Amino acid sequence: MTSALTPQEAARGALRAGLPLGGDRHEGVATTANHIHSVITTLRDLDFGDIPPAASYRAGWENIDATL
């Protein structure tokens, strides 16, 4: 597991990407990035078993049967 992104690291990363942040935004950007990272980590932990990748899904190709 990686450590949480600090406000200073968020500022450095944004500057490297050409997006200089005002000093008042560093904390918010770091908090948001850490939240996104935690959500992605949770999604990576899900077991999808034999569910095919989305690229193989074709909308409207299902066999729709309204019989109950």
Image: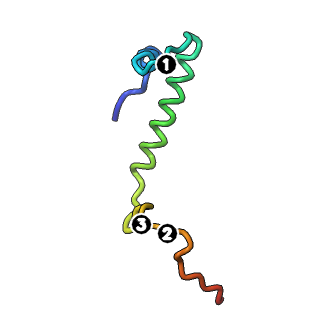
Vertical placement of residue 5 versus 12, above or below: below
The answer to whether the residue labelled 3 contacts the one labelled 2, judged by CB atoms less than 8 Å apart, is yes
Q: How far apart are the alpha carbons under marks 3 and 1?
A: 37 Å
Which residue of the protein is positioned furthest toward the top in this rendering? 23
Q: How far apart are the alpha carbons under marks 1 and 2?
A: 38 Å
The residue lying at 65 percent from left, 85 percent from top is 66
Residue 40 x %, y % = 45, 43
Q: Out of 16 and 39, give the one closest to the viewer.
A: 16
Q: Which mark is residue 19?
A: 1
Q: How many residues crowd mark 3 within 10 Å: few (<14), some (14–19), many (20+)? A: few
The residue lying at 53 percent from left, 77 percent from top is 62
Image quadrant assignment for residue 18:
top left
Q: Secondary structure at mark 3?
A: helix
Image quadrant assignment for residue 55:
bottom left
Amino acid bearing label 1? Leu
Q: Quadrant of the C terminus?
A: bottom right
Q: Quadrant of the N terminus?
A: top left
Q: Secondary structure at mark 1?
A: loop
Describe residue 29's horizontal placement relative to residue 55 as left or right. right
Return the residue at label 3: 56
Vertical placement of residue 26 versus 59, above or below: above
Amino acid bearing label 3? Ser
Return the residue at label 2: 58
